[in-house]
Amino acid sequence: MAEKLKTVLRLMEDIAPSYLAEKWDNVGLQIGNDHKEIQRILVTLEVTDSIIDEAIAKNVDMIICHHPLIFKSLKKIRTKDPIQNMVYRLIKNDIALFCAHTNLDIVQGGTNDVLAETLNIMDTAPLREMGKDNFTLNNDIHSYGLGRVGELTEPKKLATFCQEIKSKLSMKHVRIVGDLEKNIQRIGLCTGSGAEFIYDAYKQGCDCYITGDIKYHDAQYAMSLGIAVIDAGHFETEELVCKPLFENLKKLIGKNHYDMEVLLASNDMNPFQII
């Protein structure tokens, strides 16, 4: 394997260890020429045709993303299929693809910690701790898990907190379940799609739970439990991690004097529009 490719894989293992990924996940190097040296890296939330266009225009050798492009088994690669066509384009243009998914969600400093820090949620711990049945733990002493639970520095009304979220995540609207006049302080969160953890947040005594992709019956369930829920969007809660990931990788490369360049994608785009 080419030396610079091995270096990137090692650095990403330091940032988001692959052993933290859940067993069902597909992380790591998904596409790549083992003998190609990596010179330019593009960090993005997910791979789209516009991201591939950007990578080609900027002469990128590797894309590092959060959402796996290859998740289900591919039995063929045909350009008429959108996913298969993106795989084809990456191979054709000799662009490697690396994915850090649930390992980046779970690791300290990953997606959930970035969201908690952005929203000034303090003293966080995993919302649901994960054990050896979920991934292969080594002798790491840290407590790992999906989501986070923590505290605001002082109680505030749900309506006030929603306005802060809109401002900090650059959102026009959020969807809310609960009494807007209710004072909240203990907060649970899970970036991306985390409706399955509503009960975990309730069990941990959270006044409010933040995630994305809340469905109608999820909202009804939260109401029955008496816990406020804020749907702050899948894209908005996860896209925040791209800049810290870019900065972390750039810092490690500079610190070790590796001859590589890291770029932050400019074409990441939420597929939803608000009108």
Image: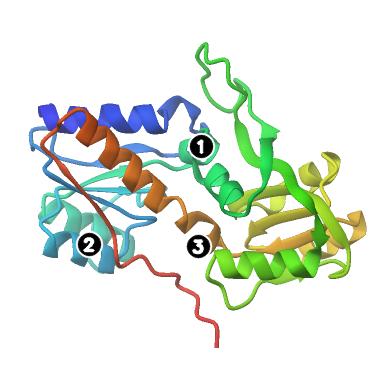
Disc number at residue 24?
1
Three-letter amino acid code at disc 3? Answer: Phe
Q: Secondary structure at mark 2?
A: helix
Residue 203 at x, y percent in the picture: 85, 40
Label 1 Cα neighbours within 10 Å, binned few <14 / some 14-19 / many ≥20: few
Q: CA distance from mark 3 to mark 2?
A: 19 Å
Residue extending farthest front:
154
Depth-wise, is mark 3 or mark 2 nearer the camera?
3
Toward the viewer: 219 or 25? Answer: 219
Task: Tell me if 227 is positioned left or right of 267 in this view.
Answer: right
Residue ID at (37%, 56%): 46
Say if mark 2 contacts mark 1, CB within 8 Å. no
Asked where in the image residue 58 lies, by quadrant, the reply is: bottom left
Q: Secondary structure at mark 1?
A: loop
Q: CA distance from mark 2 to mark 1?
A: 26 Å
Three-letter amino acid code at disc 2? Answer: Ile
Residue ID at (49%, 28%): 20
Dot 2 or dot 1: first in sequence order is 1
Disc number at residue 52?
2
Residue 17 visible in the current orientation = yes
Toward the viewer: 28 or 11? Answer: 11
Asked where in the image residue 81 lies, by quadrant, the reply is: bottom left
Depth-wise, is mark 1 or mark 3 nearer the camera?
3
Q: CA distance from mark 1 to mark 3?
A: 22 Å
Q: Indicate the quadrant containing the C terminus: top left, top right, bottom left or bottom right.
A: bottom right
Task: Tell me if 85 is positioned left or right of 146 in this view.
Answer: left
Disc number at residue 235?
3
Residue 73 visible in the current orientation = no
Asked where in the image residue 234 lies, by quadrant, the reply is: bottom right
